[in-house]
Image: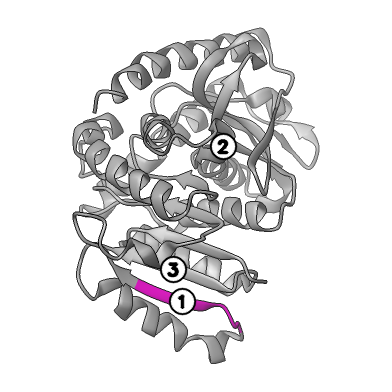
Amino acid sequence: MGKKVTVVGAGFYGSTTAQRLAEYDVFETVVLTDIVEGKPEGLALDLNQSRPIEGFETKIVGATTGPNGEGYEAIEGSDVVVITAGLPRKPGMSRMDLLGVNAKIVRQVAENVAKYAPNAVVIVVSNPLDEMTALAQIATQFPKNRVLGQAGMLDSARFTNNVAEELKVPVGSVRTLTLGSHGDTMVPVPSKSSVNGKPLAELLPADKVEELVTRTRNGGAEVVALLKTGSAYYAPSAAAARMAKAVAEDSGAVMPVCAWVDGEYGIKGVYLGVEAEIGAEGVKKVVETELTAAELAGLKEAAEAVRAKQADVAEL
């Protein structure tokens, strides 16, 4: 115990992430912050009152933050900071449509994180994900291994769920992997996907796999279109919380995340969705998995698409 985690942004994503982190009961304190006065304090009070029922001791602390960094002292000494702040998508919007508005928010948050929690591992979940992860690293000036983004776990979970529903099998029997960017250049990896150990290609025709891949790629938009307001948060918060837990426990768990790639797969100098070993210092190492020629080409293509956009964020 003694570990402290902060979740910045008390919307549905942030508050659900805080709940999951508290219920793990591996942290001493979960701090939830927001710019809406009283909201994080109210949610923290409500969450604390669930402790006797759910049987966890983690204390939840709410803190309202101001435009000039007021209130950020509450995050002091955090081991992990999850940045969920920013606007969600509306129906018909792409993740990239959020770039300008969310860049300002993420930059300001990142600068305050650097000031009050200089040793934290930062997990970014704000969209557009790959670009905001790069921006958070630039704004904090943290070593690149200590800033990572949540995308691959969520995309892989969506892919797994799609396969399980299609084949009517338990989700626990399905293994899938997605790499690349969180968006149009997502690279699902059918060669590493299986059901009860059997390759996916043996169980489904190529066109059906492609259909499930497309549905995975559009997984967030599908939820947004149904909700009409707001975007997904149950699955995304589960992914972010698992990443934070791996950092807190220094577990070395291998997960698909948005990490700094510098030479792996022949790709250099870009934040990209890859598998990585996660521990107390963030990304311990990028894990290179064997890919088919087509999958590797897709990953390199994703890297170039993301690289072009990440070069622009330094100016935002």
As helix, strand or loop, the secondary structure at mark 1 comes to strand
Disc 3 or 2, which lies upstream in sequence?
3
As helix, strand or loop, the secondary structure at mark 2 comes to strand
Identify which amino acid the numbered label 1 is placed on.
Ile
Relative image position of residue 159 (x, y in whole percent):
55, 39
Q: Residue at x 39, y 78 (%)?
A: 44
Q: Which residue is mark 2?
A: 257
**Which is more toward the observer, 134 or 79?**
79
**Which is more toward the observer, 100 or 167?**
100
**Magenta residues?**
56-62
Q: Mark 2: few, some, or many residues within 10 Å (few <14, many ≥20)?
A: many
**Which is more toward the observer, 161 or 64?**
64
Q: Which residue is mark 3?
A: 31
Name the front one of labels 2 and 1: 1
Q: Are marks 3 and 1 in contact (CB under 8 Å)?
A: yes
Q: Is residue 63 above or below residue 95?
A: below
Name the front one of labels 3 and 2: 3
* Alpha-carbon span between mark 3 and mark 2: 23 Å
Check residue 58 for magenta coloring.
Answer: yes
Q: Mark 3: few, some, or many residues within 10 Å (few <14, many ≥20)?
A: many
Identify which amino acid the numbered label 2 is placed on.
Val
**Which is more toward the observer, 232 or 288?**
288
Q: Is residue 226 above or below residue 37?
A: above
Assign the N terminus to one quadrant of the image.
bottom right
Identify which amino acid the numbered label 3 is placed on.
Val
